[in-house]
């Protein structure tokens, strides 16, 4: 659980990632490349509703439920090569589309239903075999969400969102105390919080119009494996030969290992440097630009770092 003030979560992530980046042995930020790269970043577009994820006519409670439930299961990238993907969909969009269809056709789960979901009941939503390890992990995460809603928020997603007092960092901080959003590593004996999904959930709650949240500019990059991949491909991150060889061979990186923590932390710190060079852009906006860039063929054709965990 996150021990510091929930409101201070982004600053805790930012400070820890800068600390790791200054000590990293396998990953280096090419600081001299930052100014030109930052200058070339496009302004973030105002995207239309994604037809895959849109919930036409959904009320506030349902939209809040979707944003939080989606991010509660927004992990498993190390398993993507093993899941049954929808035609033309990535691993993430396969999972997201299945969840959106469930919400459109049946509606949101209640807190009690979430608390008792099993892998066998959940698997059809995502079009996967019940025995796939992700189904048990997804069920455990949603069970935790349901438990917190029942115990602390009267079973209502709206109440959980409103308890953050209109602050994106505070909402991310609230979620960081739930096992469903746990995301802290250790590096040289120091706790390194990332909380990718807790911060992304807060941003998604705002994007979905569930709440008009302040402090979005304080959120950090959402540390996963795709943004480091894009930054490596674009020459902003340089990896040592051993780590490069492991990634290109398709080896799984142990979660919490020094190279895996360095990749995530250096990506967060690199985005901070880019945001400092382009102050009109927030770290979250730069992250979104890089994440969407990573969906292009020239990035998808190269091996990216993979790790099996419940963080991303």
Image (tube, rainbow, N blue to C red):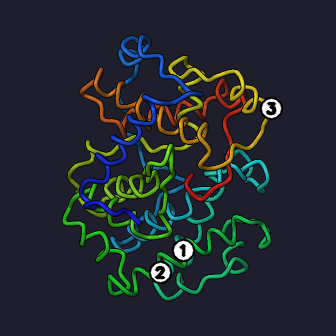
Q: Which residue is mark 1?
A: 142
Distance of label 3 from label 1 (alpha carbons): 34 Å
The quadrant the N terminus occupies is bottom left
Q: Secondary structure at mark 1?
A: helix
Distance of label 2 from label 1 (alpha carbons): 6 Å
Q: Position of residue 308 (x, y in %)?
A: 68, 53
Q: Which residue is mark 3?
A: 249
Task: Please tell me how crowded label 1 is: few (under 14), some (14-19), or many (20+) other residues with Cα within 10 Å.
Answer: many
The numbered dot on residue 146 is: 2
Q: Quadrant of residue 157?
A: bottom left
Q: Earlier in the sequence, mark 3 or mark 1?
A: 1
Left or right relative to 297: residue 184: left
Q: Are marks 2 and 1 in contact (CB under 8 Å)?
A: yes
* Residue in view at x 39 percent, y 11 percent: 36
- Count the marks: 3
Q: Are marks 3 and 1 in contact (CB under 8 Å)?
A: no
Q: Earlier in the sequence, mark 3 or mark 2?
A: 2
Left or right relative to 30: residue 165: left
Q: Position of residue 14 (x, y in %)?
A: 34, 41
* Residue in view at x 45 percent, y 36 percent: 20
């Amino acid at each position: 659980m996150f021990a510091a003030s929930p409101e201070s979560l982004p600053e805790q992530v930012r400070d820890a990632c800068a600390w790791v980046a200054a000590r990293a042995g396998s990953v280096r930020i090419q600081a001299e490349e930052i100014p030109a790269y930052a200058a070339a970043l496009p302004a973030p577009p105002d995207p239309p509703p994604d037809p895959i994820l849109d919930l036409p006519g959904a009320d506030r409670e349902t939209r809040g439920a979707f944003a939080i439930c989606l991010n509660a299961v927004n992990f498993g990238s190390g398993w993507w090569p093993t899941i049954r993907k929808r035609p033309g969909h990535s691993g993430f969009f396969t999972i997201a589309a299945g969840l959106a269809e469930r919400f459109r056709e049946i509606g949101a789960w209640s807190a009690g239903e979430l608390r008792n979901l099993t892998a066998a009941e959940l698997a059809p939503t995502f079009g996967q075999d019940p025995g796939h390890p992700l189904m048990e992990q997804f069920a455990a995460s949603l069970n935790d969400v349901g438990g917190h809603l029942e115990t602390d928020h009267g079973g209502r997603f709206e109440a959980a969102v409103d308890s953050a007092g209109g602050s994106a960092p505070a909402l991310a901080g609230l979620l960081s105390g739930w096992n469903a959003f746990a995301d802290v590593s250790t590096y040289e004996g120091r706790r390194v919080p990332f909380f990718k999904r807790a911060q992304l959930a807060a941003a998604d709650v705002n994007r979905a119009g569930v709440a008009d949240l302040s402090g979005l500019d304080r959120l950090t990059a959402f540390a996963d494996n795709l943004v480091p991949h894009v930054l490596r491909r674009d020459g902003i991150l340089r990896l040592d030969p051993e780590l490069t060889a492991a990634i290109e061979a398709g080896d799984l990186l142990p979660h919490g290992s020094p190279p895996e923590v360095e990749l995530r932390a250096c990506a967060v710190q690199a985005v901070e440097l880019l945001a400092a060079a382009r102050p009109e852009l927030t770290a979250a906006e730069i992250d979104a630009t890089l994440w969407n860039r990573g969906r292009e063929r020239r990035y998808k054709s190269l091996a990216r770092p993979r790790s099996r965990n419940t963080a991303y």
